[in-house]
Image: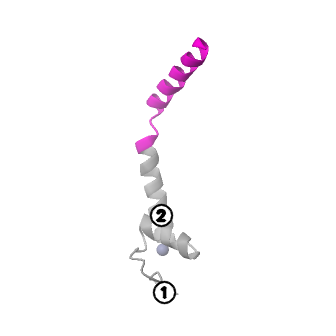
């Protein structure tokens, strides 16, 4: 099995871009790419998922709803 992606993809294995390339070409995601993608997802979630802010938004929307 080739370690390179077909076509013009410059994606490398072991990166989130590599993971996307696997998906685009319909190939089985290799362990390196899966790990990189999982890591990228975790970092993204950490960036956008702040429990305190989420709670504040929830309470604000609840108050807005209560106000009618
Ligand atoms: Zn890969």
Badge 1 density bin: few <14, some 14–19, many ≥20, Cα 10 Å:
few
Residue 22 image position (x, y, % from top left)? 52, 73
Determine if the magenta segment contains residue 59.
Answer: yes
Magenta stretch secondary structure, dominant: helix
Residue 44 image position (x, y, % from top left)? 43, 49
Work out whether mark 2 precedes mark 1 in sequence or the reverse, and give the earlier one: 1
Which quadrant is home to the C terminus?
top right
Farthest residue, direction top = 67
Badge 2 density bin: few <14, some 14–19, many ≥20, Cα 10 Å:
some
* 7 vs 55: above or below: below
| Disc 1 secondary structure class | loop
Residue 52, picture quadrant: top left
Determine if the magenta segment contains residue 56.
Answer: yes
- Report the span colored magenta: 47-68
Q: Nearer the viewer, mark 2 or mark 1?
A: 1
Q: Name the residue nearer the viewer: 54 or 25.
A: 25
Q: How many marks?
A: 2
Q: Name the residue nearer the viewer: 10 or 30.
A: 10
For the residue with label 1, is its CB less than 8 Å from the closest atom of ligand 1? Answer: no
* 8 vs 18: above or below: below
Q: Which mark is residue 35?
A: 2
Residue 65, picture quadrant: top right
Identify the residue at image location x=59%, y=75%: 26
Identify the residue at image location x=47%, y=61%: 37
Circle 1 residue: 2
Residue 53, picture quadrant: top left
Q: Which mark is residue 38?
A: none
Identify the residue at image location x=42%, y=81%: 8
């Amino acid at each position: 099995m080739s370690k390179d992606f077909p076509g013009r993809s410059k994606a490398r294995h072991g990166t989130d871009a590599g993971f996307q390339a696997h998906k685009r070409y319909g190939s089985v995601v290799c362990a390196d790419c899966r790990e990189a993608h999982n890591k990228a997802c975790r970092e993204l979630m950490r960036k956008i998922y702040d429990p305190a802010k989420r709670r504040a938004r929830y309470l604000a929307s609840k108050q807005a709803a209560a106000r009618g």
